[in-house]
Amino acid sequence: MKKLFALVLAVLGSAASAQTPTTNPMPDGSRDMYAGLGVVSGPRYEGADSRKTRALPVLQVQWSNGIFISGMSAGMHLSANPTIEYGPLLAIHPRRTESGTGGEIGDVAGASLLPTALRAFAGNPLAGMEEIKTRPEAGAFFNYYLSPAWRLTSSVLAGAGNDRNGVRGEIGIQRLAMELAPHHTLSLSAGLGFANRAYQQSYFGVTEAQALASGNPPYRPDGGLKDLRIGARWNWVLSPSWMLTSSLQATRLAGDARHSPLVERPTNLTVSTAFAYRF
């Protein structure tokens, strides 16, 4: 159980991809559950220059039959081999409004009062862009342990975007919990994100109609490499039931995504901290 207690807890609604907890031998019919609350600060949307701080709900549940829930994702471990993990994966891709968040645009930069041609230059490139609705995604994950401390990870999810044909994937490597001191562990990760043309067009492209409405120049990105990520997570076990978990993730957009007229800052940091309770 100590191994599971040191796992990364997923950030609900963050830009982070779906999480796949490590497998853990458990008695039949049992489960492990963590729930908590904290705060997270990150960009308003992928490539935004401004930031938003919001509440950070934390949830992770794993059952002995391999089913798990981790933040806004869920899946099932199917492998009986302790060095290999694979199975189906489900996730929720959050919506993106003109404000870059899940809320209404309001009066960001007075966008609704400005001439169309000036909206993109008023501090909000998304003003006049079509809202992208919340979408369920389905796919799979595959992880391989190089050693007990190092794990290669990969996942693919399909269904994002208003046309539901966006596909994104990730490959990465993780250094699992290193003990810095009694009750203190540090985990490190790095990875690459990929997306197909439909995903890139939904989140980084500008159609002719959107260009007229927003003032952004038309832009049609191709699929390929989307971003590069590095991250660190520090866990402080306060008691057998309570833990303080904090994380830092740096993301840099790459390829055609980086050159989108919607991108104000290609490199961004997301930081979070939360208390979690083990049931």
Image: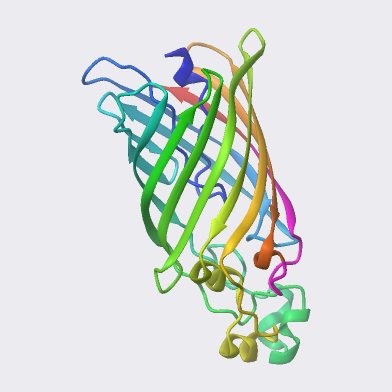
Magenta segment boundaries in residue numbering: 259-272
In the picture, measured across the screen, residue 237 lies left or right of residue 123, that is left
The one nearer the camera, 34 or 200, is 200
Query: Which quarter of the image is occupied by the N terminus?
Result: top left
The x, y position of residue 261, in whole percent, is 71, 75
The residue located at (56%, 66%) in the rendering is 223
Q: Is 122 one of the magenta-colored residues?
A: no
Relative to 151, residue 104 above or below: below
The residue located at (54%, 65%) in the rendering is 103
The x, y position of residue 121, in whole percent, is 78, 80
The residue located at (50%, 52%) in the rendering is 169
Query: Which quarter of the image is occupied by the C terminus?
Result: top left
In the picture, measured across the screen, residue 31 lies left or right of residue 95, that is left
Total labels: the figure holds: 0
Relative to 53, residue 222 above or below: below
Q: Is 267 one of the magenta-colored residues?
A: yes
The x, y position of residue 43, in whole percent, is 68, 55
The residue located at (65%, 59%) in the rendering is 44
Q: Residue furthest top?
A: 182
